[in-house]
Amino acid sequence: MLLQGRVAVVTGAGRGIGREFALALAREGASVVVNDIGVGLRGDETGEDPATEVCAEIEALGGRAVPAHDSVSDYDAAGRIIQTAVDTFGQIDILVNNAGIVRDRSLAKMGPDDFDAVIATHLKGTFNCTQHAVGPM
């Protein structure tokens, strides 16, 4: 229980490595905000709610978790993700900027909209969440 009493936010935590980060943090005692907007890697709507599903997994392990469905690419929405940790658990100690999307195209085939979506998630998303987390940390 290395992280007992700590609070973590993991973006893109509904699937893949983000899910594993969230579960590992919870196994070590951290309370976790599981952020995922519920779309596929290519940004397509899936109708699924992976954030809530991961929270249920964490709770089944005896941990504490809450979902956050806002997009990291939106500055104000990223603030709500971080605020979820503060409002629910009273603090934030750990931020894992994991959210990402795939636009599997070569430069010659990638359009400006695809490029902007990748930049908004990977770069702006990291900046947005980190900037909001710095104060409470």
Image (spheres, rainbow, N blue to C red):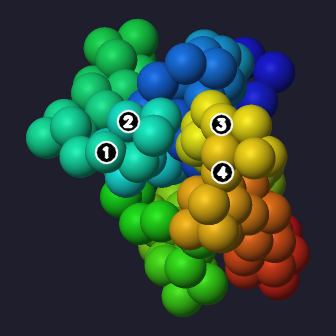
Can you tell which of label 3 and label 2 is closer to the viewer?
A: 3
> What residue occupies the far bottom of the structure in this picture?
76
Residue 9 locus on image (x, y percent): 63, 50
Image position of 37 with respect to 131: above or below: above
Left or right? Give the position of 9 relative to 84: right
- How far apart are labels 1 and 4 at the CA level? 17 Å
Cβ atoms under marks 1 and 4 closer than 8 Å: no
Q: Which residue is tagged 3?
A: 105
- How far apart are labels 4 and 3 at the CA level? 5 Å
Residue 23 locus on image (x, y percent): 55, 19
Cβ atoms under marks 1 and 2 closer than 8 Å: yes
Q: Amino acid at mark 1?
A: Asp
Q: Secondary structure at mark 2?
A: loop
Q: Which residue is tagged 1?
A: 44
User: Which labelled disc corresponds to residue 40?
Assistant: 2
Residue 18 visible at all? yes
Residue count near mark 4 (Cα–Cα under 10 Å), binned few <14, some 14–19, many ≥20 = few
Numbered circles on residues, count:
4
Cβ atoms under marks 4 and 2 closer than 8 Å: no
* Residue plotted at (31% across, 45% down): 44
Cβ atoms under marks 1 and 3 closer than 8 Å: no
Q: Which residue is tagged 4?
A: 110
